[in-house]
Amino acid sequence: MTFRYFYCFLLTLIALWAQAVPIMQKDSARALLRKWKSEHPEYPYDTWCIRSEPEQRYAIDTGLVNLEEYNGIQRPGIEFTNAGNMGTAALPLVFSHPLTCGFRSGFHQFDVYKIHRDSVRYYSVMRPYTELHLLLGLQNEQMLDGRFAAQHKQFLSYGVRLKRYYSRGRYPNQRANDNCFNVYAIYQSPNNRWRLQGDVVFNAFKVRENGGVTADVFDTAIIQPVLAPVAFTFAENVYRETSFYLQTSYALGSKYSVLVNDSTRVPVTLPVWTLSHRVGLERQLALWFDTIPDKVYYDNLFTQNDTLRLDFRLTNFSNALRADFRWRSATVDTVITEKNLIAGAETGFEYFIIRHNRYPHQTPNVYVSMDVRSNAASRSRLIYKAMAKAYLYGWNRGDLLLSATAGYITERWGIVSLHTALTQSEMPYIYERFRSAYVSWTYTLPKSTIFSAGAKYHQAAWGIFAEAFYYRVRNLPVYPGRAEPQVGFTNENFAVFRIGNRHAVKGLHFDNDVWFTQPFDVSSYDILRLYTRLFTRHSLYYENRLFKKALWLMAGVDVRFRYQHNPPYYDPLLAAFYPVSIHSLPIPQLDIFLNVKIKTVRAFAKIDNVVSAILGKGYYALYRYPAQNLSFRVGISWRFYE
């Protein structure tokens, strides 16, 4: 309840501030726009970027497409499956190559809901930007997502995002309460040389875990889901992440002038070379409580105690130096010429302090990385990106990341690109070390290795796109098990294909996405026991603008289908997903939605999983975790002052 009041109070203040500031401004819209272009000749207004590619600007979305996809697991691209209700543990339906290496604690079941530092949006706005998303569902569900950003000339910009998922679930002990927020502030000196940036990211998850149902709820005479027998009746999973980052930068480059008033120009620096220093503090907390533990289920973990408890705490101090080069130049009349080259190099040190059930452990990490990429601001048709990262010392010594992308943009034939990557990563910490008063283990597991190579094609004018990727995976999947972690030592060879289209005829749209996984040998079928063989997503909807375009309307259906889907087994104690050889029933998921927009207000109404009501039978999202049945939800998205 405290979080609800906290969110409402903060969002109310944000909304009032966003409304008050524009009213006090005396500039007209045109004058404000001219002033913005003079002060920010390199950036369009009302856009955002991410930390790793600040030159790539994205417009703030005000459309209706995918507005009804509210729950975090339904999204453009690869979708996820969860443990039965919004905010619970989730796993992707299709395999993809995670381009990461370095330390992993092992608690990643909530990653899809988190605010990650690399996904934080940094806004460039003419005037304060505020947008609120709110959802309510009949099955005790709430979703709140609020964003606010403001900028004072070119000197100071800041923003905040608050995100909350809450769902009670249909089965016993299934409540999920997820709360996340991030705050950033960036100060840029008047001459563009000095830059100071601070980031705070917080993610908190408090989820009651029931371990899944212990009887087939679709084949038994269970009248109400709340009466279904479950594995855990008093278990709770608490996970928190808190991260602080502070980065200072000094830039070197050519000079150009900006207009500060009708007749005065001042010289500023166009950053070409940038030297940066970053310090960070990250903390993780993973707590597991079960006051009535099932000794058969837990086997030899904590069986000598009436209460099962897992307490994992991690603190990471990080320090990094980075140098960046962006090839560009400027003239005195603010004309900026961008070249198609950006390069950077970084070296960093990390120190981890770990307390696992009160047993301490400390370990360092040292890494170096280099990257080079094309400059989106240059408007070049050649796109490329390459990165190399290696850990030289510490817990992750020998970890490696190599990736490369090259493509070309043509006006007639679209975009074609080639991709390849190789990662070698240490197993998650919790898989290799377990410490408690009753049982402990220490294993030196082999590193997991993933190689991928593929191609992408996209033609927006024709509304088609396609992807094909080959994967060679070693030492995956991992079975942490009960004090006996096991790894698949054989090489798994398989390919993932995707095709899709976006077509419309007189307002009637028909969008399709199809993913298909094809193994090349018998040993590769472990992947099919963890991911879906065939996953399809289809949308048929009608779109129109009515009443002199004052009302934007979109109504239709979404259909999702899984074939040869083996719902993975979820181990909530060790946050792991295990392959299972039991096929789920190929029951399609049908959703009906209505999206509308009037000025800056967008709203939707959605009926989820209609087929379950028609057939009177559902399916399992994860092993022993039934997917949600028929439900009705409404949501609103309101952008204040546009």
Image (cartoon, helix red, strand yellow):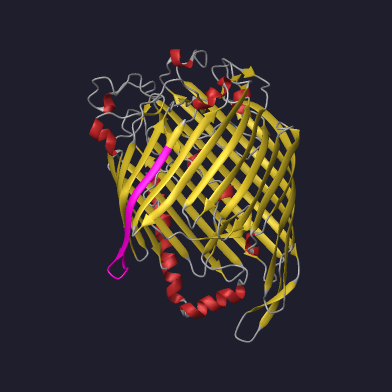
Residue 410 placed where, x, y %? 59, 58
Residue 572 placement (x, y as % from top left): 47, 27
Q: Which of 310 and 213 is in front in this view?
A: 213
Q: Which residue is drawn at 71% across and 57% down?
A: 342
The residue range painted magenta reads 536-553
Name, please, the residue furthest toward the bottom.
263
- On screen, residue 218 above or below 611: above
Q: Answer left or right for 271 relative to 206.
A: right
Counting from the top left corner in percent of width and height, residue 396 is at: 70, 32
Res. 634 visible in picture? no
* 550 is within the stretch colored magenta: yes
Left or right of 314: which side holds 112? left
- The image quarter in which residue 139 lies: top left
* Magenta-colored stretch includes residue 349: no
Q: In which quarter of the image is the C terminus?
A: bottom left
**Split into 4 quadrants, where in the image is the N terminus?**
top left
Majority secondary structure in the magenta region: strand
User: Residue 603 at what x, y percent from top left?
Assistant: 33, 56
User: Which of the two residues, 301 or 252, is positioned nearer the viewer here?
Assistant: 252
Relative to residue 326, is residue 143 depicted above or below? above
* Residue at (67% x, 36% y) in the render: 422
Query: Measured along the vertical axis of the image, is residue 171 above or below residue 548?
Result: above
Does the rendering let one see residue 9? yes
